[in-house]
Amino acid sequence: MALIKCKECGKEMSDTANICPHCGYKNNMIFCPECGNKISRNAAMCPKCGYRLNNNTNNEAVNPVCLSGMVVAIVSFFVDLFGLVSLTALILSTVGLAKAPKGKNRTFAIVGVVLSILELLYKFVQLVIYMSTY
């Protein structure tokens, strides 16, 4: 960590700070940990030495609706109240699927939809078997 001067107010701030603590100016420059070259915070690698930076700009945030739909669908295989848990999982996963166009969130939502439909079909078969015995 090094101290640099803020371009806006001129006071010292950390080179790792996203914003200046004095004036709020956005700091989008960092130093390469390998060679010390000043580079953009959004760079994937240092142009001087080629060091690959570990920035999380490409990581997709987990959508809680997609993830919860999948988790509830898995739980519905163990605890289900007349298909209500499976139906809840299906609704959550469908809403998550509509909001997640691609990536791991879409995968979570699709797994939730498939599992909840399988569980609902299983409950329907159980109901048919139960009704046919009486």
Image: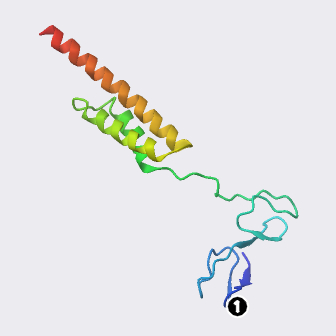
Q: Amino acid at mark 1?
A: Gly
Q: Which quadrant of the view contains residue 82?
A: top left
Image-based side of 99 in relation to 27, left or right? left
- Packing grade of label 1 (10 A; few <14, some 14-19, many >=20) is few
Tell me which residue sits at (52%, 44%) in the image. Answer: 101
Image quadrant where one finds the C terminus: top left
- Which residue is depicted at the point 82% across and 62% down? 46
Q: Is residue 91 left or right of residue 20?
A: left
Quarter occupied by the N terminus? bottom right
Which residue is painted at 78% across and 66% down in the image? 33
Q: Is residue 68 left or right of residue 17?
A: left
Tell me what residue is drawn at x 82 percent, y 64 percent: 34
Position of residue 133 measured from the top left corner of the image (x, y, whole percent): 15, 8
Indicate the secondary structure of the residue bearing disc 1.
loop
Q: Looking at the picture, does residue 35 appear above or below residue 58? A: below
Where residue 121 appears, x then y in whole percent? 32, 22
Pointer 1 residue: 10
> In the orientation shown, which residue stands out farthest toward the bottom?
10
